[in-house]
Amino acid sequence: MNIVKRKHADFPSIFDELFQTDWFGGIANQVASTTNIPATNIKETADNFILEVATPGKTKEDFMLALDHDVLTISTETKKEEIADEATSANEKYTRKEFSFESFKRSFKLPQTVNKEAINATYTNGILSVALPKREEDKVKPKRTIEIS
């Protein structure tokens, strides 16, 4: 759906109608390629930092996680073909064939306290969860009391 501003709502412009309609029942100039940046939660526990990335409709195979020095990059690219009117025989041609490409790339600078060798990720119910364990020496030590002698 496109939102079109018109100066005079009572008098639609013939040029707007001419260039907005694709004459096959759809709207022209629809975005066939999108870049979405998913919402991300970052939480800290005593032992980990946890990134939670909301990416519904994906599979774990869609993701690429890369670590370059202290930068973690999460990316995905999905290509999808939708056919509006499917052909019923080999001799028919499509009147419309639409392609859709969707991708995102997000990078996070990791703190020095992360054990980069132990990073792991899971994908469940549309949430990519990346566990960034803290190094042993950087974990929060429990409070202790010191006895006076």
Image (cartoon, rainbow, N blue to C red):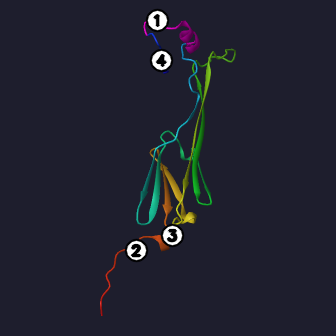
Residue at image mark 4: 5
Task: Tell me which label, 2 or 1, sits earlier in the chain.
Answer: 1
Residue at image mark 3: 135
- Find residue 67 and report its image quarter: bottom right
Residue at image mark 2: 141
Residue at 43% over, 10% down: 9
For marks 1 and 4, give the CA distance: 12 Å
Residue 67 — which label? none
For marks 1 and 3, give the CA distance: 67 Å
Task: Tell me which label, 3 or 4, sits earlier in the chain.
Answer: 4
Q: Position of residue 48 (x, y in %)?
A: 45, 63
Magenta-highlighted residues: 9-24
Task: Tell me which label, 2 or 4, sits earlier in the chain.
Answer: 4
Q: Amino acid at mark 2?
A: Lys
Badge 2 vs badge 4, beta-carbon distance below 8 Å = no
For marks 3 and 2, give the CA distance: 12 Å
